[in-house]
Image (cartoon, rainbow, N blue to C red):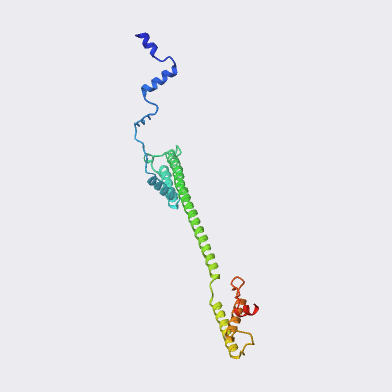
């Protein structure tokens, strides 16, 4: 039995390690997270940021400098001229306690100022991004309005203005007056002509309108039946 057990056991060390891993757990099964002895301390970043910014703003005011100067003068005066039993920071030791307090204040003030500066940088970055987006929207709106104005100008070129209509009516009235005068003073047409004076006046007015029009709007001249018969 011992020989069979020895033969069934893997002789290769790699196979032995894999067998040990299978006994502990499968490779595709994630391990559970480690339990912490102490709870993780995660303060509210917004509240902490507001506090640091308020402290940084207060440190940059004249009131802070005045209060700090009064505190240091009182400290030095008390530990210099007060009775010896009332002094708590000896002058002989160079005011060691005051030096430590000022050093502690400086060591805390530097990171607080850096935190306030980082928050201000984040706000500036967000404001710059918003300004860039607003500028892009304004540019797109301006381009759209420019295209619309250009299309309106192109469309207004084909619209008849008041002066143009007046000029056309005036020319039409002059043509009508001339036609009336020709109808009154026109003599009878010569022999072989089948046209009446009214038809001649109409043809003349039509020719004048064709000359006034552009080459694209000119009408195709019509063949008169009287002339075609005579030519044949």
Image: 214 above or below 67: below
Which image quadrant: the C terminus? Answer: bottom right
The residue lying toward the viewer, choosing from 91 and 73, is: 73
Task: Pick out the residue farthest to the front.
Answer: 232
Q: Quadrant of residue 6?
A: top left
Image: 143 above or below 97: below
Give the percent coordinates (x, y) of residue 3: 37, 8
* Residue at 53% across, 68% down: 155
The residue lying toward the viewer, choosing from 129 and 81, is: 129
Give the percent coordinates (x, y) of residue 48: 39, 45
Image: 61 above or below 100: below
User: What number of labels is visible?
Assistant: 0
Residue 193 in the figure: left or right of residue 121? right
Q: Quadrant of residue 229?
A: bottom right
Give the percent coordinates (x, y) of residue 174: 58, 84
Image: 46 above or below 16: below
Q: Quadrant of residue 105?
A: top left
Give the percent coordinates (x, y) of residue 1: 34, 9
The residue lying toward the viewer, choosing from 141 and 92, is: 141
């Amino acid at each position: 039995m011992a020989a069979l057990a020895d033969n069934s056991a893997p002789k290769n060390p790699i196979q032995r390690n894999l067998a040990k891993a299978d006994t502990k757990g499968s490779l595709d099964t994630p391990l559970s997270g480690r339990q912490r002895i102490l709870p993780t301390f995660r303060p509210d970043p917004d509240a902490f940021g507001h506090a640091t910014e308020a402290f940084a703003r207060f440190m940059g005011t004249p009131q802070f400098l005045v209060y700090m100067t009064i505190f240091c003068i009182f400290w030095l005066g008390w530990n210099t001229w007060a009775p010896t039993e009332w002094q708590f920071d000896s002058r002989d030791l160079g005011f060691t306690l005051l030096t430590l307090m000022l050093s502690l204040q400086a060591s805390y003030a530097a990171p607080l100022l850096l935190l306030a500066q980082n928050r201000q940088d984040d706000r500036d970055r967000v404001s710059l991004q918003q300004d860039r987006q607003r500028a892009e929207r304004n540019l797109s709106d301006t381009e759209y309005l420019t295209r619309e104005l250009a299309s309106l100008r192109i469309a207004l070129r084909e619209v008849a203005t008041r002066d143009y209509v007046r000029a056309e009516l005036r020319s039409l009235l002059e043509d009508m007056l001339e036609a009336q005068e020709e109808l009154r003073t026109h003599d009878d047409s010569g022999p072989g002509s089948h046209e009446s004076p009214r038809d001649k006046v109409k043809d003349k007015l039509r020719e004048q309108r064709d000359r006034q029009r552009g080459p694209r709007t000119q009408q195709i001249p019509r063949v008169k039946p009287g002339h075609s018969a005579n030519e044949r």
